[in-house]
């Protein structure tokens, strides 16, 4: 079972979720290049200008670890990254768990993405403008944690090393992506986990993903926000288990 | 008691910062007046909504992707720069602290969010960013200026080099002109001698008189013409050389008697001959001739007398030297002729190898000595270099390629084979 984090965090995202599957499955956790504990030197501006660059990394990781017929669990933008990887290498995953997926964030005629083009540009401009504010905020957040050194250690690993320039680029790639056409080409079985009141991936988007995928189940979680894996891990785990139990229980990674 | 609660209520409502409390589900239960006033809303409007609902779009996204996860993982965040949206749509820059309050069993009771108005601070930051940006721009401009300066210098240098190349070309043409003129002039003289001799010969022969004197004169003219041709050929590197393996030390030793006589009493001859000197493969006459030419120039440069040193040495010309002086890197035998004479100006040095270039005045110099040496050395695959300082003297070094003689070749190969094994 391969877990992929989304924009803004790193593999720490999964800390409340993956232990629930550790007995049954081999667990693979990683940080995207440019995030968390990844080697920042491996960041290649050209490669990561589209989600395909990130999908290639997932394929490489799975090939290296001999993952076939596995389960991919992707949060946010990584849900789509995993879908792309599964189209390019269908033998890797039999199942995709897509948490808060969005194939396109900007509204387009009939399609509701949740953001107007102007809003996404406002976001990107804000990142450009307020770079210093963000990084300072980040720094204080990380430094001011003397009571729980084990946490701060983890957070320093995770947030300190997120290069603001790379974060900006990742945001740009994420929020300007349009992978709607890829959905129909996914052959793996998919579970779409949709949060209530998710500003980043509204319900209409989750419904769209579910409708376009050839073989998918849709679960609307009680959890609000964009990170049910953190805010409602029990609900997330149970939705995943229900989904896995519905199909052949013999299959393992 | 009620007095105390009123007091606390007042403290909460009119604090210089915004207070918002949210339940475990993230929904706001309470907001203070300060916060409501900042956003231009009624306090009741906040209840049931979430804090991130009042952020601008970037703030919403960052709140969900960064700060909510952070809050969940460490229980708080501090001094996060965000923009709130007022009822009228305008923005309020704030710094936000948030902390989770849990009961003894660890269950989340509520979240306390504290909001500081950061309009001023954000303005400073923006000004600071602006200042940094303009400093960076100024720096970039300066670098651009520097770059163009370098470019301009490079252009000027190139132009200068071009003009120098043109000048050298002109000097070469001048030399060629002199060469042609010189040849014409000298041949004319010699031919005149030969022609007049033949003329007289013809007349005397008709009268049956003694003609031996004219034959001698014609001979002389013809052989001088032949010698001139030889020197010209040497300069143009087309003389016929008969190279043989030889030891320069031995040759210098054999020449020293003749050299002493040529130099006269005021010039002392010294030889510094290297032990274990390698062989060279060269034309013996041509090398002798070259050494003589150099020795005679040295003598001419020391009218008051002085010291002439002939030195030999094994020498290795490396890649760097080779590249700079247009000579193949490798092993050479060096023969240096050094005097304590007048020295040369850099002007003279630049032209010294040109045929017919002389500073010695008509009838004294031919300007063909060094050009001939130069031609010979180049034809032999060697290298020649002048070191000279006004008032100190001159040293002219000839480098001829090392020759691996039969015996030496074998040794050389053996050594090579050993190295490979
Ligand atoms: N050893 C030396 N010391 C000073 N000047 C020299 C020396 N050798 C050559 N020169 C200069 O180089 C010129 C050219 O020399 P060369 O070609 O031998 O012609 P020439 O000896 O007939 O003048 C000389 O006229 C002299 O100016
Ligand atoms: Mg001379």
Image (cartoon, rainbow, N blue to C red):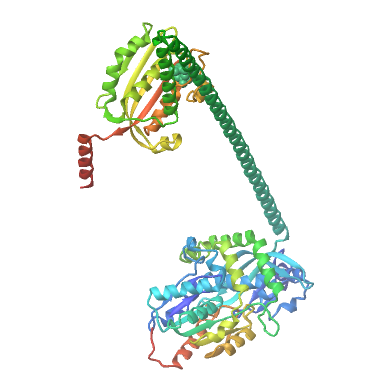
Q: Is residue B328 above or below residue B72?
A: above
x, y percent for residue A7: 56, 72
Above/below status of A135 relative to A252: above
In the depicted structure, whether residue A220 falls above or below residue B26: below
Give B64 or A217, whichever is nearer the viewer.
A217
Who's the residue at 38% across and 22% down the image?
B290
Q: Which image quarter: residue A70?
A: bottom left
User: In the image shown, does A109 or B337 lie closer to the viewer?
Assistant: B337
Residue B97: percent from left, percent from top: 62, 66
Q: Quadrant of residue A180?
A: bottom right
Which residue is found at the position 26% from the left and 26% from the top? B247
Q: How many marks?
A: 0
Image quadrant where one finds the N terminus of chain A: bottom left
Q: Return the x and y of residue A177 as percentages of the image width and height.
A: 61, 75
Front position in the image: A250 or B143:
B143
**Which x, y percent locates residue A182?**
56, 82
Quadrant where the image shows the C terminus of chain A: bottom left
Q: Is residue B283 above or below residue B7?
A: above
Name the residue located 61 percent from the left edge and 77 percent from the top edge. Answer: A178
In terms of depth relative to the viewer, which is nearer, B400 or B55?
B400
Q: Quadrant of residue A214?
A: bottom right
The answer to whether residue B230 shows anywhere in this view is yes
Q: State the residue at coordinates (36%, 21%).
A: B289
* Res B344 seen here: no
């Amino acid at each position: 079972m391969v877990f992929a984090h989304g924009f803004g965090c790193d593999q720490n995202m999964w800390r409340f979720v993956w232990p629930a599957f550790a007995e049954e499955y081999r667990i693979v956790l990683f940080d995207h290049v440019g995030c968390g504990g990844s080697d920042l030197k491996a960041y290649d501006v050209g490669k990561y200008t589209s989600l395909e660059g990130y999908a290639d990394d997932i394929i490489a990781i799975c090939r290296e670890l001999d993952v076939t017929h596995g389960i991919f669990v992707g949060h946010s933008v990584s849900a789509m990254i995993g879908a792309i990887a599964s189209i390019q290498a269908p033998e890797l995953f039999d199942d995709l768990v897509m948490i808060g997926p969005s194939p396109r964030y900007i509204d387009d005629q009939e399609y509701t993405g949740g953001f107007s083009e102007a809003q996404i540009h406002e976001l990107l401009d804000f990142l450009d403008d307020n770079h210093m504010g963000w990084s300072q905020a980040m720094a204080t957040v990380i430094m001011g944690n003397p009571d729980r050194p084990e946490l701060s250690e983890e957070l320093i690993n995770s947030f300190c090393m997120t290069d603001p320039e790379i974060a900006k680029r990742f945001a740009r790639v994420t929020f300007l992506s349009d992978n709607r056409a890829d959905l129909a080409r996914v052959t793996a079985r998919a579970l779409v986990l949709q949060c209530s009141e998710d500003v980043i991936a509204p319900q209409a988007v989750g419904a769209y993903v579910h409708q376009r995928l050839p073989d998918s189940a849709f679960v609307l979680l009680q959890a609000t926000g964009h990170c049910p894996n953190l805010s409602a891990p029990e609900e997330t785990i149970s939705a995943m288990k229900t989904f896995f139990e519905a199909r052949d229980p013999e299959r393992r990674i | 008691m009620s007095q105390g609660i009123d007091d606390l209520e007042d403290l909460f409502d009119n604090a210089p910062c915004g207070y918002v409390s949210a339940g475990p589900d993230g929904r706001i239960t309470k907001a203070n007046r300060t916060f409501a006033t900042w956003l231009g809303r009624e306090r009741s409007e906040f209840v049931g909504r979430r804090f991130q609902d009042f952020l601008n779009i970037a703030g919403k996204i960052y709140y969900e992707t960064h700060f909510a996860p952070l809050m969940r993982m460490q229980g708080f965040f501090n001094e996060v720069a965000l923009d709130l949206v007022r009822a009228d749509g305008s923005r309020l820059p704030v710094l936000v602290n948030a902390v989770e309050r849990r009961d003894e069993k660890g269950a989340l009771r509520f979240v306390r969010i504290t909001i500081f108005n950061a309009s001023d601070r954000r303005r400073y930051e923006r000004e600071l960013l602006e200042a940094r940006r303009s400093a960076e721009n100024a720096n970039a401009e300066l670098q651009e200026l520097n770059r163009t300066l370098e470019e301009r210098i490079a252009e000027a240098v190139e132009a200068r080099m071009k003009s120098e190349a043109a000048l050298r070309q002109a000097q070469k043409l001048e030399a060629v002109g002199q060469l042609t003129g010189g040849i014409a002039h000298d041949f004319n003289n010699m031919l005149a001698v030969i022609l007049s001799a033949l003329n007289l010969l013809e007349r005397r022969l008709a009268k049956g008189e003694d003609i031996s004197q004219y034959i001698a004169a014609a001979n002389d003219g013809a052989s001088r013409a032949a010698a001139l041709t030889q020197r010209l050929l040497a300069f143009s590197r087309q003389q016929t050389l008969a190279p043989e393996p030889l030891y320069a030390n031995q040759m210098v030793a054999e020449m020293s008697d003749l050299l002493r006589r040529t130099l006269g009493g005021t010039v002392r001859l010294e030889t510094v001959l290297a032990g274990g000197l390698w062989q060279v493969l060269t034309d013996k006459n041509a090398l002798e001739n070259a050494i003589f030419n150099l020795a005679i120039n040295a003598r001419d440069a020391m009218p008051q007398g002085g010291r002439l040193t002939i030195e030999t040495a094994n020498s290795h010309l490396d890649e760097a030297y080779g590249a700079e002086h247009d000579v193949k890197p490798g092993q050479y035998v060096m023969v240096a002729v050094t005097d304590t004479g007048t020295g040369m100006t850099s002007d003279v040095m630049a032209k010294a190898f040109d045929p017919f270039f002389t500073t010695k005045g008509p009838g004294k110099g031919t300007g063909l000595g060094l050009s001939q040496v130069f031609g010979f050395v180049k034809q032999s695959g060697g290298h020649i270099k002048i070191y000279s300082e006004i008032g100190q003297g001159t040293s002219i070094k000839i480098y001829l390629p090392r020759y691996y003689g039969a015996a030496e070749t074998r040794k050389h190969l053996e050594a090579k084979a050993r190295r490979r094994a």
